[in-house]
Image: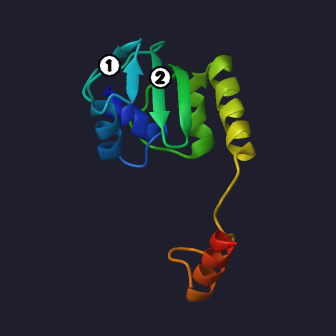
Amino acid sequence: MRLDKWLWAARFFKTRSIASSAIEAGHVNLNGERAKPARQLKLGDCLLIRTPHGEFEVEVMQLAEQRCAAELAKTRYTETARSVEKRQRDAFAKALQPSFDHPQIKGRPTKKWRRLLTTLDHS
């Protein structure tokens, strides 16, 4: 089975083309080596997948070409304990980082908010 197709079916990426782009960009390693989208995947292969929502280290448990529900897709692989722990640490560290965005502002600041920012800068 193709690597990009499995990543899409296991719900790591929303589309196959996004999965292919990620593989070509080097965000997916197969058994410790950089892979190509058409590379054949076998049971027991280890994957290191870097996505915008985390880094996953998984072992392939099932090969399936069809996309299914998220709960069923999780049965197609097992994530290593080290990977789960690292993602939890990263999430905790991200939660501790200060946020400088105004909670009510989306996009460009309003005139009122800009004035308030400039008065805070000058005082």
Up/down of 19 relative to 113, above or below: above
**For this rendering, which residue is in front, 77 or 49?**
49
Q: Position of residue 96 (x, y in %)?
A: 75, 44
- Residue pictured at 66% horizontal, 26% vertical: 86
In depth, the one of 99 and 72 nearer the eye is 99
Question: Residue flagged by tag 2: what amino acid is it?
Answer: Leu
Question: Which residue carries the number 1 mark?
Answer: 34
N-terminal of the two: label 1 or label 2? 1
* Mark 2 element type: strand
Q: Residues within 10 Å of mark 1 (few under 14, many from 20)?
A: some
Position of residue 111 measured from the top left corner of the image (x, y, whole percent): 56, 87
Q: State the mark number for residue 57.
A: none
The quadrant where residue 25 appears: top left
Identify the residue at horizontal 66%, vertical 18% (top origin).
82
Q: Quadrant of the N terminus?
A: top left
Residue 45 is at least partly visible in this image: yes
Q: Who's the residue at 62% across and 23% down the image?
A: 83
Distance from the alpha carbon under mark 1 to that under mark 2:
10 Å
- The residue carrying mark 2 is 48
Q: Amino acid at mark 1?
A: Arg
Tell me residue 53's x, y (percent): 55, 42
